[in-house]
């Protein structure tokens, strides 16, 4: 199985962030009396479920951003190492 690239991790984070925003929008609708009094039990159930899923989304987002950052730092370290260890250009002879 191939390693995920930084782009893949950023895409995962973006999807998790979108899901998180959607879940919090649903929670906000439920908490501001979208349902009638007869459905408050359903409302509470939806809010609990959305909160649990939002927690999962936040963990997914954090993990993806951490991995993307690590990949970026690794890539920068390799590039810096290549610059530092590059052979010096030949000196031009003095006239």
Image (cartoon, rainbow, N blue to C red):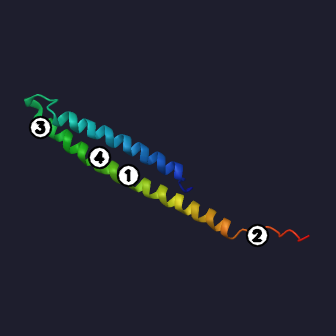
Chain-order first, disc 3 or disc 2: 3
Instruction: Find the distance from the CA under tag 3 to the CA under tag 4.
Output: 20 Å
Label 3 crowd (10 A; few <14 / some 14-19 / many >=20) = few
> Circle 3 is placed at which residue position?
41
Instruction: Find the distance from the CA under tag 1 to the CA under tag 3.
Output: 29 Å
Chain-order first, disc 4 or disc 2: 4
In the image, is 22 to the left or to the right of 48?
right
> Circle 2 is placed at which residue position?
88
Vertical placement of residue 84 versus 58, above or below: below
Chain-order first, disc 3 or disc 4: 3
Q: Residue at x 17, y 29 (%)?
A: 34
Q: Look at the numbered discs 3 and 4 and tell me whether their residues touch, using CB distance below 8 Å.
A: no
Give the structural element (helix, strand or loop) at label 4.
helix
Q: Residue at x 33, y 50 (%)?
A: 58
Instruction: Find the distance from the CA under tag 4 to the CA under tag 2.
Output: 53 Å
In the image, is 78 to the left or to the right of 64?
right
Quadrant in which the N terminus is drawn: bottom right
- Residue 80 sits in which quadrant? bottom right
Chain-order first, disc 1 or disc 2: 1
Chain-order first, disc 4 or disc 1: 4
> Circle 1 is placed at which residue position?
60
- Foreground disc of the pair 1, 2: 2
**Residue 54 bears which disc, if any?**
4
- Foreground disc of the pair 3, 2: 2
Q: Residue furthest right?
A: 95
């Amino acid at each position: 199985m191939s390693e995920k690239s930084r782009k893949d991790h950023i895409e995962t984070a973006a999807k998790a962030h979108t899901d998180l925003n959607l879940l919090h929008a649903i929670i906000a609708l439920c908490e501001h009396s979208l349902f009638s009094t007869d459905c408050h039990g359903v409302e509470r159930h939806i809010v609990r479920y959305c909160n649990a899923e939002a927690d999962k989304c936040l963990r997914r987002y954090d993990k993806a951003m951490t991995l993307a950052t690590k990949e970026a730092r690794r890539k920068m370290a390799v590039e810096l190492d290549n610059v530092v260890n590059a052979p010096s250009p030949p000196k031009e002879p003095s006239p």
